[in-house]
Image (tube, grey):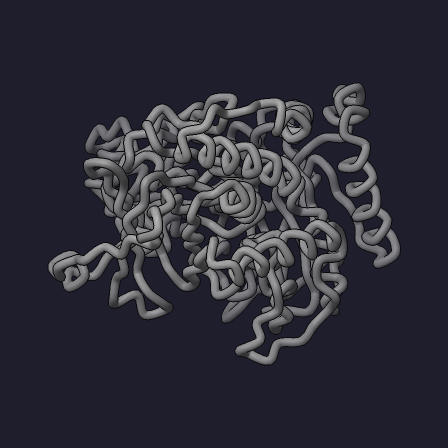
Amino acid sequence: MTERRPVLAVIGAGPAGLAAALAAASRGVRVVLIDSAAAVGGQFYRQPSPGLAAGGPQVLPHQRRTWDRLRAGLDAQLAAGRVTHMSDRHVWCVERESGGFVVHALLGPEQEESTTVRADAVLLATGGYEKVLPFPGWTLPGVVTAGGAQALAKSGLSLPGRTAVVAGSGPLLLPVATGLAAGGARVVALVEGGAPAAFVRQARIWATAPVKVVEGAAYAARLLRHRTAVMTRHMVVAAHGEDRLESVTVAAPDADGRPAPGSERRLVCDLLAVGHGLLPHTDLAEGLGCRLDGTGVRVDAEQRTDVPGVWAAGETTGIGGAALSLAEGHIAGRSAAARLTGTAPDPRGWAPAARSRTRLRTFFAALGSAYGDPPARWPEQITDDTVVCRCEEVTAGAVREAVGTFGAGDLRTVKLLTRAGMGWCQGRMCEPGVAGVAGCPLTPARRLLARPVPLGVLAAPTDPTTPR
């Protein structure tokens, strides 16, 4: 009888999850890699969809060698039986039990059935999601999130428009704009809320990560070749159209954060890709009781959370890009393998990844500071009839009534009075906007279930699978 190897459930197959799975599997741990997508890679390494016969521009314009190395390593571990890849699984809960954990995941696009996996430890690599702030007209067809537009372009699928404006704030906008241009769209403008002076003040930090600076410069050069106008310290005020998007109005904020008189400019477009940065996915971590550090999951030098047996890596611990996710995933995978096999963790083995982690965390902290926060008075531009919660069709006027008339002073009370955040997305899309309109702090809401689950799934008996 062969000895059972310890099982590590890695949730998320983006850069952090892949790096963690490979590091753990190569050190004697049985890895179950669980992901909601049909193929590994996450958003950064997203591939064209073979099932849809999608075609399009060349994907992975950079870090091709890294992806090839990850893919080859995973293929080798799959063939050796050390890694099991479970695709199209949407994890909705992770339960702690005596001696380990049970991972519950919904199956496929219909999500009407569930599967369960028993593991000795869990590594959360659930990534991030977009922060989008509402404005009049943001629900028009043709207005999409920046990441959504990027996903369409990377997947080789049809874009919802041919004349595009990319707007908001954050480092994601540059690759989105260049990706749309490569996909055949005419990107008339990149509208960035950040100010150039803020980047100049961080010049000493940029020197610590020259590869990222070169990468940014390459994106900027592509925009110049496509004759895309770059408008810094501007924001979208409103989107216009009847049945779909026809144009957007942008403006420069004044010292108080309101659109400066005379700065408004209307841009004709049928595609607006808008985003205001990313937020960590922490639903599963919060359900397990893991503490947060700001908006991300708190981890130690080994990427361990404060819940025994739970590690976290990548953008669930804080937004920092693919290279940082790879470093954190490698450290987490090695640490988890050592702890599960009863050997002493050897930080010397992951010292290069730790140095990269430190450097990149400093870089992205400076980058976040340079981009800054949205103008303080942006909620004032949202009219009362603007829908701020799409799932439940709650307007800004209803949120303001909940605060001004009924005395709601926090997001939970606003939610109870208006249903804002009770829909399918569970507030992921609308909470930043609702919080801004309500004047409430954006506080995490711990949920037992990370996503909506059919009652039939909750009622059905479970028989967890224990990989060997």
Please provide percent x and percent y for residue 416: 20, 40
Name the residue: 79% across, 19% down: 204
Q: Which image quadrant for residue 254?
A: top right
Q: Which image quadrant for residue 49?
A: bottom right
112 sits left or right of 388 in the view = left
458 sits left or right of 382 in the view = left
Please provide percent x and percent y for residue 419: 24, 47
Q: Which of 366/17 is in front?
A: 17
Q: Residue furthest front?
A: 1
Please provide percent x and percent y for residue 291: 35, 25
Q: Which of 46/341 is in front?
A: 341
Please provide percent x and percent y for residue 466: 29, 53
Q: Residue furthest bottom?
A: 53
Q: Which of 27/203 is in front?
A: 27
Q: Which image quadrant for residue 400?
A: top left
Name the residue: 64% across, 33% down: 253
- Residue 44 visible? The answer is yes
Name the residue: 45% across, 45% down: 126
Name the residue: 72% across, 67% down: 183
